[in-house]
Image: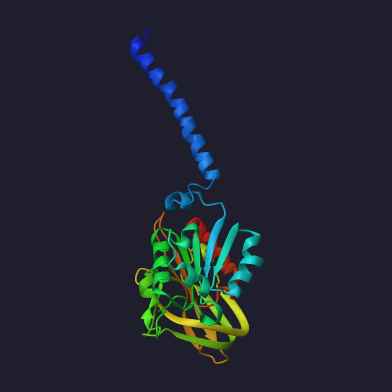
């Protein structure tokens, strides 16, 4: 018994073959375009593709002349991560606040908002705060340290800068954020989210023996997640302070992600390294 092959009209077979042959060059052109776009970093500015592809050099705008952060980037982070940065001190921020032709920050991939030199970027102008808010709302990432941007610059600096920014993962426990400094015997930091890639190297937490630390007492903002807690001991059996050390506001793939540090992250450079790497790849 022989099995008959199904009959395919010659015209239909030829039409299918013709369509297939026409598809090949189109697919090749698309592949070439994707490769060129990836090499030229054209897709990096599009949130979804930037997060998906990762890689490439990350351009960071450092808000405030925090030399501890600058030194950490130069001596630690740049060794393994391709990053460039530009520091915007208070005078720079005042200069670019009202420039025409778009925001100065648009060309950057990430901002690190610091307290600056002697706290001069704790209070920022309304226009600067709005520019930074637009930056993060466009799908880019940010790191916020301590009280950076906490106030609106005015005659009395009483306006809430974090309310204008809208993306800071932390809130103050009172009208004015409380900041403390301590000479400690020991600091223990404990992961609150063991699956967070920033903390994967520290399943047992972090420990510091003797030194000085300045920290901000904060709560987690609505929709934000504390990922690291800290307990500061000054010799007594009961810790002098227990609270949040790092708080994260995560976005879905293709949207912004923000990390808040309640202490100076250059105290432990690996944390800052992991944070920049994580925000860079949106992982």
Q: Is residue 73 left or right of residue 17?
A: right
Q: Residue furthest front?
A: 100
Q: Nearer the viewer, residue 27 or 110?
A: 110
Residue at position x 57%, y 63% in the image: 85
> Residue 95: x, y in percent?
49, 70
Total tally of numbered discs in the picture: 0
Asked whether residue 118 appears in the rendered view, the answer is yes
Q: Position of residue 176 (x, y in %)?
A: 40, 85
In this orientation, which residue lies closer to the viewer: 240 or 260? Answer: 260
| Residue 179 image offset from top left, x and y in percent | 48, 85
Q: Quadrant of the N terminus?
A: top left
Q: Classify residue 208 as left or right of residue 156.
A: right
Q: Position of residue 113 (x, y in %)?
A: 49, 71
Specify how the rendered protein is coloured.
Answer: rainbow
In the rendered image, which quarter is residue 82 located in? bottom right
Q: Quadrant of residue 221?
A: bottom left
Residue drawn at (40%, 18%) of the image? 18
Instruction: Looking at this view, name the residue that lies furthest to the bottom.
Output: 236
Vertical placement of 22 versus 143: above or below? above
Could you tell me if residue 7 is visible in this image? Answer: no
Q: Nearer the viewer, residue 3 or 146?
A: 146
Q: Is residue 173 above or below residue 37?
A: below
Q: Residue at x 47, y 72 (%)?
A: 94
């Amino acid at each position: 018994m022989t099995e008959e092959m199904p009959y395919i009209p010659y015209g239909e077979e030829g039409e299918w073959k013709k369509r297939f042959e026409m598809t090949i060059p189109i697919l090749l052109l698309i592949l070439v375009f994707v490769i060129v776009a990836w090499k030229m970093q054209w897709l990096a500015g599009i949130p979804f593709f930037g997060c998906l592809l990762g890689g490439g050099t990350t351009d960071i705008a450092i808000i405030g002349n925090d030399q501890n952060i600058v030194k950490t980037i130069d001596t630690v982070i740049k060794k393994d991560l391709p990053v460039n940065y530009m520091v915007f001190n208070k005078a720079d921020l005042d200069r670019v606040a009202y420039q025409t032709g778009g925001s100065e920050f648009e060309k950057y991939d990430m901002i690190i908002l610091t307290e600056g030199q002697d706290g001069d970027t704790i209070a920022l102008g309304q226009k600067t705060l709005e520019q930074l808010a637009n930056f993060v709302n466009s799908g880019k990432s940010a790191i916020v340290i301590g009280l950076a941007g906490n106030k609106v610059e005015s005659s009395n600096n009483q306006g809430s800068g974090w309310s204008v920014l809208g993306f800071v993962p932390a809130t103050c426990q009172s009208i004015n954020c409380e900041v403390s400094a301590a000479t400690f015997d020991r600091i223990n930091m404990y992961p609150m989210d063991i699956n967070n890639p920033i903390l994967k190297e520290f399943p047992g937490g972090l420990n510091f023996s003797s030194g000085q630390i300045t920290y901000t007492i904060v709560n987690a903002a609505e929709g934000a997640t504390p990922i690291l807690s800290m307990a500061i001991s000054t010799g007594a059996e009961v810790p002098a302070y227990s609270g949040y050390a790092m708080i994260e506001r995560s976005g879905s793939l293709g949207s912004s992600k923000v990390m808040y540090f309640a202490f100076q992250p250059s105290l432990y450079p690996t944390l800052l390294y992991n944070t920049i790497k994580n925000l860079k790849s949106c992982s």
